[in-house]
Image: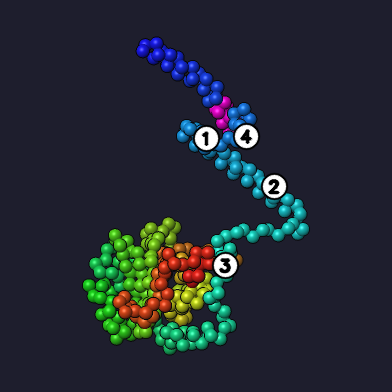
Amino acid sequence: MEKTGGSRKKGLKHKSAAEEPQEAAVVEDGATESGGRAPKASAFPPGFSISEIKNKQRRHLMFTRWKQQQRKEKLAAKKKLKKEREALGDKAPPKPIPKTIDNQRVYDETTVDPNDEEVAYDEATDEFASYFNRQTSPKILITTSDRPHGRTVRLCEQLSTVIPNSHVYYRRGLALKRIIPQCISRDFTDLIVINEDRKTPNGLILSHLPNGPTAHFKMSSVRLRKEIKRRGKDPTEHVPEIILNNFTTRLGHSVGRMFASLFPHNPQFIGRQVATFHNQRDYIFFRFHRYIFKSEKKVGIQELGPRFTLKLRSLQKGTFDSKYGEYEWVHKPREMDTSRRKFHL
């Protein structure tokens, strides 16, 4: 037994001594790669991959150096192309359009044509016609779910400073079916309910009164004013300008008209405030900014807050009715066609 043990020790020593030149080759190769030269053929065979290195730290080091080399080569090629374009001047070929998720989307058949007679008739007879005909002015009630926490309450208070003529009332355990008739009797045109989960706002219900529709949104990425870096001073009482981007389909057109009906008709541009609802890949990003005129030609923007992201979950006809309500559209992720994405806003 002692002889076999000694032979094993000798075998291990011999094996470790045989592996030393390979490790030295790898270290030498790392030094050459950090210096910008190509790896040696003796250290890396033609079919060699960095993932074959079993040592985790060495594998991570080699991968990091390889990524750095890739960035340097990409930057050098970009600079070379820029110099060539500057040398050619007007004769330079046009820049290729990069492929993005937005410009590679399949055209949606439900995209609204502004000159369509059917769309114009629908707009003249829908629930928001009285607002766009300037027959009514918006009056908003903002409330929360039952027993809200401080973060949700502060969001409601800050949202009331963004939307003019809006009033914050606490829920006090009342059901929405009892709140809606009270809102109609007091001439409220819209009801906004902020729901929460684990002390964080996670949902928004927007109901247009008195005849609907009602939209349910998932809310995420909420940032209050104190949580926004380099934010401006608190907003003034001026009526902000509203911007609606990419609400191009029939469904998006309805949602965009709901957001537009929350704000008065004539914005006060002297306040330099703008509320933006930007739809991108069916997520609605809300931002509230103020214009900063640096000179006659340069204009900047300063975020005032709050900010959040909405995702439409359902659009219901009439006012809120979770039991007998008729839904125009419901988000069904398992049944939707992801290749054509027919649920566009």
Which residue type does callout 2 highlight? Lys
Of the two numbered discs 2 and 4 in the rendering, the one whose residue sits closer to the viewer:
4
Q: Closer to the N terminus: mark 2 or mark 4?
A: 4
Q: Residues within 10 Å of mark 2 (few under 14, many from 20)?
A: few
Residue type marked 1: Glu
State which mark lies toward you, 2 or 3. Answer: 3
Q: Is residue 165 left or right of residue 101?
A: left
Q: How many marks?
A: 4
Viewer-nearest residue: 332 or 160:
332
Mark 2 element type:
helix
In which quarter of the view is residue 197 placed?
bottom left
Q: CA distance from mark 3 to mark 1?
A: 41 Å
Badge 4: few (under 14), some or many (20 or more) residues near its Cα, within 10 Å?
few
Mark 3, residues whose alpha carbon is within 10 Å: few (<14), some, or many (≥20)?
few
35 is within the stretch colored magenta: yes
Disc 1 secondary structure class = helix
Q: Position of residue 186 (x, y in %)?
A: 30, 84
Residue appearing at x 38%, y 65% in the figure: 219
Magenta segment boundaries in residue numbering: 25-39
Q: How is the image coloured?
A: rainbow
* Up/down of 312 relative to 65, above or below: below
**Marks 2/4: CA–CA distance:** 29 Å
Work out whether residue 327 or residue 58 is closer to the camera in this orientation and state it.
Answer: 327
Q: Earlier in the sequence, mark 3 or mark 4?
A: 4
**Residue beneath disc 4:** 46
Is 75 or 126 nearer to us in this picture? Answer: 126
Q: Which residue is mark 1?
A: 52
Asked if residue 294 lies left or right of residue 154, the reply is: right
Q: Which mark is residue 80?
A: 2
| Residue under pointer 3 | 106
